[in-house]
Amino acid sequence: RRADTALHRAKAAGGNETAFFETAMGDAAEQRFRVERELRRAIPAGELRLFLQPQVDAAGALAGAEALVRWQHPERGLLAPAVFVPVAEESDLIVDLGAWVLTEACNLLARSEAAGQPVRLSVNLSPRQFRRAGFVPWLRHLLSATGADPAHLTLEVTEGLVIDNLNQVIASMSELSALGLHFSIDDFGTGYSSLAYLKRLPLGQVKIAQSFVRDVTEDLNDAAIVMAIMAMSRTLGLQVIAEGVETQAQRDFLLQNECLAYQGFLFCKPIPIEEWAPLLK
Ligand code: C2E
Ligand code: MG
Ligand code: MG
């Protein structure tokens, strides 16, 4: 296990590296093993919860929501994804977790459509889940089994998805786009990838990362990056959504630059799906 921990560290440092085991690594590894073991039990035990964070248009009207997972841990309370999603992403657990989230989201879509109040949902998709053989037919089946309208579903992918196997990724994305599904690039500008993929992938939306939005009114560099992303997206015909919008000043800056969609604590925090229905009214 210690050798495995050191190997893990070497890979995380970029691979082709040597790493020695140290006790502090052992604690972190221990913690990871524990989370992984508990999560494996928690998913079938029904301890995951779905939260929704509203997305609004330039006028502040509800336009959709992002689905965000939480873990209602029996002893540790409600856990944020930062505690368990990265651990899940290192194993096949992310596939089970992602399947649970997508199933919940599609059921919710179908219910909202049946109630005549359709929402648009964005769901985070891990590269590992997307690359897995059989994902596309699985999702197609889920959509038809739940009756959810694919046009109401957006999959949020990250730049890491396109690092390798670009042709396979394009083929899968195109197949899903043909069903009516939309794609959004999450945390845009924070990964390591080329801009070339923007015109090759069937994308509909670019999400400006919170890290750029945070200081947009004080830091000229962040302001320049945000303006550049918006200008580029407009030209490429991509919708832009800004995330992590917390202050009126940030919103004003984005509005001046003709941003059309917003998400952040200024409008609403993520809320449990049980509390979603009243908000629709
Ligand atoms: P993300 O997809 O970029 O989601 C946005 C995160 O920013 C959410 O954190 C949200 O609660 C937070 N946020 C929204 N508005 C504000 C704001 O105004 N200020 C601040 N400070 N934060 C804001 P959360 O829910 O903790 O999720 C963190 C990350 O975990 C997500 O980042 C996503 O990468 C991952 N994640 C969440 N749910 C899922 C899931 O179902 N599947 C996968 N694969 N990953 C997920
Ligand atoms: Mg997201
Ligand atoms: Mg994001």
Image (spheres, grey):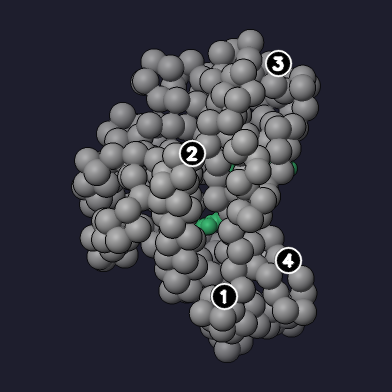
Report x, y in % for residue 114: 41, 47
Q: Are marks 2 and 4 in contact (CB under 8 Å)?
A: no
Q: Which mark is residue 138?
A: none
Q: Which mark is residue 46?
A: 1
Dot 1 or dot 2, earlier in sequence: 1
Hey, what amino acid is under mark 2? Gln
Hey, what amino acid is under mark 4? Leu
Q: Residues within 10 Å of mark 2 (few under 14, many from 20)?
A: few
Q: Nearer the viewer, residue 281 or 35?
A: 281
Residue beneath label 3, please?
252
Report x, y in % for residue 107: 43, 57
Q: CA–CA distance between discs 1 and 2?
A: 27 Å
Query: Of discs 1 and 2, which sits in the foreground?
Result: 2
Residue beneath label 4, please?
78
Residue at horizontal 40 percent and vertical 40 percent from the top: 152
Residue at horizontal 60 percent and vertical 38 percent from the top: 280
Query: Which quarter of the rendered picture does the N terminus lie within?
Result: bottom right
219 shown above or below 114 = above
Query: Of discs 3 and 4, which sits in the foreground?
Result: 4
105 shown above or below 87 = above
Label 1: element kind: loop
Dot 2 or dot 4, earlier in sequence: 4
Q: Are marks 3 and 4 in contact (CB under 8 Å)?
A: no
Dot 4 or dot 1, earlier in sequence: 1
Q: Are marks 3 and 1 in contact (CB under 8 Å)?
A: no
Q: CA–CA distance between discs 3 and 1?
A: 41 Å
Q: Nearer the viewer, residue 2 or 46?
A: 46
